[in-house]
Amino acid sequence: MHNQVNLADAYETVARTIEPDAPAVLCDGEVLTWGEMEHQSNALARYFVQRLSGPDAKVGIYMRNGPGYIVAFIAALKARCVPFNVNYRYASEEISYLLDNADCEAVLFDADFWPVLGAIPDISKMPILVSFRGSVEGVEPIEDILDGPSEPLALKRSPDDLMFTYTGGTTGMPKAVMWPGGAVWANLVNGMQLPGRDKPDTLDKLTEQIKSGEGRVRFYIAPPLMHGTGLMSAIGIQLMGGSLVMTGRPSYDAEATLEEIGQLDCMGLVIVGDAFAKPLLDRLREDSGRYDLETLRVVSSSGMMFSPDVKLGLLEFLPELILLDGLGASESSAFASSRTTKDTPPGEAQFDLTGAVVVDPRTLSPIEPGSDQIGILAKGGPQPLGYYKDPERTKKTYVTIDGERYVLGGDHATVNADGTIKLLGRGSNCINTAGEKVYPEEVEEALKRYSSVKDALVFGQAHPRFGQSVVAVISTYGEASLDAVEETARKHIAGYKIPQKIVVVEKVPRADNGKADYVTARELFDAKVGVE
């Protein structure tokens, strides 16, 4: 039986126990203390209760990283509203869809996003619009609300209170994953356990841990909070009484990130795979002596491939690092994970299952270890209720196996004889060439083994004979020999997986969270091939 706790209650427990002047968020020279965060989130929560329809009112957070995002998120939880993420890369039409799909009643936004938000028809009819980081004519600024009453709300909350996480929409329109706060807590609390201590899985045990002063880590959150990796990491760190370090810069800057890690004595760094790690490694290779990274001990990644060569490169400069690599999705917590140190070199896409199984997609029966049979990942335990307003898709993704509810991941894998898994990639992007299945992520990893390849995306192209052929776009460090790239890849993957054509582009297209943008990659490929 999993102990389930309401997230707002957990936040209030930390705030009551920790010193009020302890830093909760450090961002671009600004420090938000735990006392200030509690005061501000209470004031905003009271505003929600006064102005919205009641519990379960949907609150969209349309902001870059910063203290305001955290305050807005906690305030919505405290008021028993449902916070959800709004992708700030979206255009007006996409945001309009999101707000309509969520049945949104409030949008909290950075003022410089108003040209996009304000272009949505009838946006002025939204019950609540609140601007952060600036003012907008006719819109209430957050400062006015924070001047209001800020006593804690006397609400009886439930672990079943919801938060939404909108998917990236890579396989269709974005969908809201309905996470009960208690399920979020049950998944995060495993990572909050300290060596030699009980798991802090009740509010009393959490109080004891916070009082001890142990585990109050300072983590740099590099990815956007609007994506699952950033937000879930942030929640887990703060519920240990830790501090979040972040920036409101509009794009990722590896050089500035390394400098800030040193200046603010960060013990940990959260990233999204190679898209974040490779630029860090590039900066270290250029001038490793420039950065003071004495306090950095943990780099945690999720959501994208974190290549073995990149991990080894980081360990070359920072040998004391622990590199944690989680395989997760918006629809679940981590399915599998790996841990790399100087004493445990990384394997190629090798992961240990974390309460998950690999099952046959047709029968849902577990795959026999060592059989080389390809299956899909399935995870049990506390998990989301499904997709908001999409029961059909929910039935396909959340299934019952031997009487227990599981979520099916999109990742395909084989199970090694020792029970570890070899990750192959997402089935939705699988390439079928002459009857052979090719998983893009596996090929991308092989291409990036060549030292001059900065990034790569692999996808299928229509072929008159084979159905599809494997092609790729890559970005490089200066000039690179495509023959040498291919030759290196052949040492790691079968010949039929080697791209039939590779084109070099200035920058491999990725979303702000580092995830592959295959649509734009195809357009770049077609444009290059058409010119040649």
Image: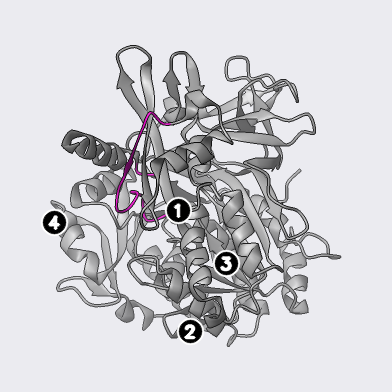
**Disc 3 designates what residue?**
269
Residue at x 16%, y 53% (from the top left corner): 120
Which of marks 3 and 1 precedes in the sequence? 3
Residue at 37% in and 39% down? 170
Mark nearest the camera among 1 and 3 is 1
Image height of 316 relative to 122, above or below: below
* Tag in front: 3 or 2: 3
C-alpha separation, residue under disc 2 versus residue under disc 1: 40 Å
Tell me where the magenta segment starts and ends, as one range: 499-517
User: Could you tell me which quadrant the N terminus lies in?
Assistant: top right
Marks 2 and 1 close (CB-CB < 8 Å)? no
Mark 4 vs 1, N-terminal side: 4
Horizontally, is 142 left or right of 434 in the view? left
Question: Of the residues tagged 4 and 3, which is closer to the observer?
Answer: 3
Report helix, strand or loop for mark 1.
loop
Mark 4: secondary structure: loop
- Residue 420: image x %, image y %? 73, 36
Query: Circle 2 is placed at which residue position?
Result: 31
The mark nearer the N terminus, 2 or 4, is 2
Residue 509 on image: x %, y %: 33, 49
Q: Which x, y percent locates residue 258?
A: 51, 74
Separation of residues labelled 1 and 3 (CA atoms)? 26 Å
Of mark 2 and mark 1, the one earlier in the sequence is 2
- The answer to which of 117 and 80 lies nearer the viewer is 117
- Disc 3 marks a residue whose amino acid type is Leu
Which label number is shown at residue 119? Answer: 4
Q: Residue furthest right?
A: 196
Q: Is residue 241 left or right of residue 229?
A: right
